[in-house]
Image: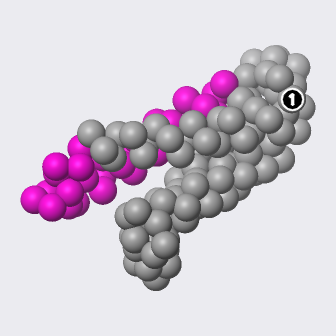
Amino acid sequence: MNRYLKIIIYGLLVWLVPFAVSFIIYPLKAPIYPLFESILSVVIAIAAVFFSYYYLKDTSANFVSEGVITGFSWFIICILADLLIFMPASPMQMSITNYMTSIGPKYLIIPAVTIGMAYMALNKASIKIGGSL
């Protein structure tokens, strides 16, 4: 599969998984808002780890740059997908200020995970090449 297509598809899936889970756990939002937010943060992290693994497993070089590019691409994809749903002209209507202070920052988990996974892949590759530590 083309690298760019893979980034876009996985990015959409990284967004879709937490979005779907948010519908399932929506009844928790009003009575236990901190639990709702915590669950979504964990789901974002799990989705980022899962898709980072599948994206990076076929990478043989430039691990860190791939992790940075992928992470920030997925971050942007998630923000743009949310903006289509949460902006005032959309069904869920939320101001940009409310969005950027409540939902948007959670997506910074994604580049943190992809970059961390990339460093791990780089370390694993260097151990294979140079021998054990």
Q: Pick the quarter of the image with the N terminus.
A: top right
The answer to which of 44 and 92 lies nearer the viewer is 92
Residue at horizontal 55%, vertical 41%?
Answer: 14
* Residue found at the very far bottom of the displayed protein: 97
Is residue 73 left or right of 13 when viewed as pictured? right
Residue at horizontal 88%, vertical 38%?
Answer: 62
The answer to which of 75 and 126 lies nearer the viewer is 75
The quarter holding residue 103 reads bottom left
Q: Is residue 103 visible?
A: no
Is residue 3 left or right of 103 when viewed as pictured? right
Where is 87 relative to 133, above or below?
A: below
Q: Residues within 10 Å of mark 1 (few under 14, many from 20)?
A: few
Picture coordinates of residue 61 (x, y %)?
A: 89, 32
Picture coordinates of residue 38 (x, y %)?
A: 30, 52
Residue at horizontal 73%, vertical 23%?
Answer: 57
Residue at horizontal 61%, vertical 42%?
Answer: 12
Where is 129 relative to 116, above or below?
A: above
Q: Is residue 26 visible?
A: yes
Q: Secondary structure at mark 1?
A: loop
Q: Amino acid at mark 1?
A: Asn
The quarter holding residue 67 reads top right
Magenta stretch bounds = 25-54
Picture coordinates of residue 4 (x, y %)?
A: 83, 39
Where is 73 relative to 46, above or below?
A: below
Picture coordinates of residue 42 (x, y %)?
A: 38, 44
Q: Pick the quarter of the image with the C terminus.
A: top right
User: Is residue 30 shown in magenta?
Assistant: yes
| Residue designated by label 1 | 2
The answer to which of 32 and 9 lies nearer the viewer is 9
